[in-house]
Amino acid sequence: MAGVIDAAIVTLPLENSALRIAEIRRDRLVVCLRQDDPLALKKALEPADLQDKLTFLYQPQRHPAAHRKLLEMLGAAGVQIEEFSRASHPAEMQAIMKGGYGVALLREGTILEGDLTMRPINGVDWTVDTVAIYHRQHHPKTIPVLVRHFTNKLRKDEKRTASVSRKFPPAPVNDGPIQLSLFE
């Protein structure tokens, strides 16, 4: 094994001029909070609503550049994070929120456990951007085709999920992993 990876799926930011970066998904960040939190009465929150309530963030060591970018976006909106606790997975973040320990930022569309809800944030365009990366010049010829197919498949699934979610309320729990076949 040469230790070389042909392609990967990662979260931005990422800067490397030797890599081709193909966006495959963009998810808006929204606030996750308990349904009985007074902020849940609002249809949308203001960035100032997060001050002193945003107490949990994802582990900064998992993606230091994304953590710095998040702190920059929060600061630009007037939200200063002095201290925070760390979580490593959306399920862990939700368990903490259910316990009543503030609010958190999650990807819009994350399946929530009972007693939790999500609210958008007015006046900001905060997203988590997921991309496929591969070397600009030295990659198997199939990689761009697979990335394009994978991206199209995700978009079709998003549209289907969006149309179903308008007809039916979201399930309260995630029953297992989502399976995706590139060759349906």
Image (cartoon, rainbow, N blue to C red):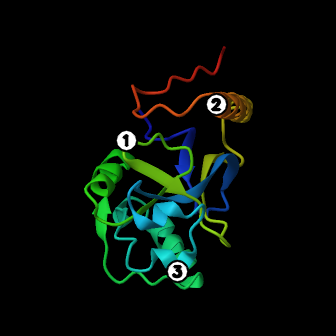
Residue at 55% x, 33% y is 169
Q: Please name whichever residue, 89 or 165, is drawn nearer the observer in this view of the structure.
A: 165
Q: Which image quadrant for residue 37?
A: bottom left
On the image, numbered disc 2 is attached to which residue? Answer: 161
**Disc with the residue nearer the chain's start (2 vs 3):** 3
Q: Return the x and y of residue 57 as percentages of the image width and height.
A: 38, 65
Lateral position of residue 71 relative to residue 154, left or right: left
Q: Quadrant of the N terminus?
A: top left
Q: Return the x and y of residue 74 as percentages of the image width and height.
A: 53, 77
On the image, numbered disc 1 is attached to which residue? Answer: 114
Q: Please name whichever residue, 141 or 62, is drawn nearer the observer in this view of the structure.
A: 62
Q: Secondary structure at mark 1?
A: loop
On the image, numbered disc 3 is attached to which residue? Answer: 48
| Circle 1: residue type | Gly
**Disc with the residue nearer the chain's start (1 vs 2):** 1
Residue at 31% x, 79% y is 83
